[in-house]
Amino acid sequence: MKSTTLTVVLGLIGLIGGTSLASAQAVYPEKSLQLLVPFPPGGASDVLARIFGGELETRLGKPVVIMNRPGGGTTIAAKEAARAAPDGYTLFYSSNSSFTLPAAVKESVPYDATKDFEPIGRIGQTTLALVTYKDNPISDVAALVAEAKANPDKLSLASFGVATVSHFAGELFKSAAGIKMVHLPYKGSAPAMNDLIGKHIQYHVDTVIAVKPQIEAGTVKVLAVFSGKRTPFLPDVPTLAELGYSGVDFASWGAVVAPKGLPPAVRDKLTTTLEEIVNTPSVIERFTQVGFEPGFVRYSDWAGTIGKETAEMKEIAQRAGIKEE
């Protein structure tokens, strides 16, 4: 009789404990979230993060604090995100700059993108553009290439960080054109763009998101875009492929992830919420206004997808001569 009573009591305790756990997961989130961004305020990633971060805050009912962590070619922020508690309160927004390119060019990366992150979803992509200051007498790619060939390593080509999509695209262009230019890495898009406008640097590779406001303000001019076809955001700007540099088709895609080990219920809630955000007409309008092409993707095999692209990027890096600095 005592054994039966004990069994019933233990069963009730287990039931209560299970109910408490389910309730705890059901009320997520109970506190504010932090969204890590590997670039300083004002850059493309920061702009996008603030758009969907604000929507996430509204839908989850808790503050979403944007935490800018620039430097290290995005690895500083990625490392912090990978080592955070997998409880759904730390999210990381970045691009191939963090998830595939570092491992393609660096001997050692302080995290494993295939194993250390839980994918929430991909939100879309943006085209990259080759830009210069507004009154540069060199006004097209052919003249730039001719000048670079006549004066190797005399012209500068900036990026918004070592081993970022900006750096990678620039090196890909130099390799395709057979030219040598000095690479100037910055800690983010905004400081690089400021120096370009101030004529402290000559050329820069950045996203259409960062370039579009400067074009409208008349402070820079675009020579070409890196996409395989012309972008609707800059329909009069030719692609590098059009100009004779085949194989140059490169874009910056953005994804939201969390530290590995996220509770399934929390992950599903975040994924569903993010998908709803990206597919909301007002958000689509805001994304397209800044030059971002929205398109939500759920990752069924994050490790496989990232591993495959990293291998492809390694091949390009070796061919283009991209090396860790």
Image (cartoon, rainbow, N blue to C red):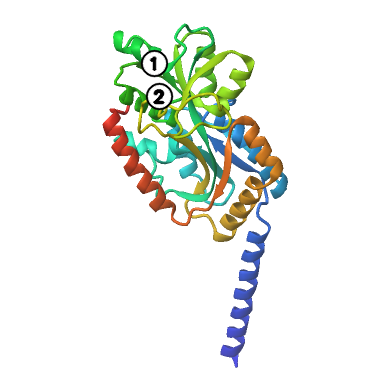
Q: Answer yes or no: do the residues labelled 2 and 1 have beta carbons within 8 Å? A: yes
Provide the secondary structure element on which disc 1 rests.
helix
For the point 59% across and 26% down, the residue is: 41
- Above or below, 49 against 188 in this view is below
Q: Say which quarter of the image contains residue 6.
A: bottom right
For the point 44% across and 35% down, the residue is: 228
- Above or below, 108 against 260 in this view is above
Q: Is 130 on the left-hand or right-hand side of 149?
A: right
Q: Amino acid at mark 2?
A: Leu
What residue did someone put label 1 on? Answer: 142
User: Label 1 neighbourhood size at 10 Å, few (<14), some (14-19), many (20+)?
Assistant: some
Instruction: Residue 45: give x, y in percent of width and height.
Output: 55, 33
Q: Which mark is residue 127?
A: none
Is residue 127 or residue 122 the one in the foreground?
Answer: 127
What residue did someone put label 2 on? Answer: 243
Instruction: Residue 9: give x, y in percent of width and height.
Output: 62, 81
Instruction: Residue 151: give x, y in percent of width and height.
Output: 31, 8
Is residue 112 or residue 197 the one in the foreground?
Answer: 197
Q: Is 192 on the left-hand or right-hand side of 50?
A: left
Q: Say which quarter of the image contains residue 7.
A: bottom right
Residue 43 in view (yes/no) = no
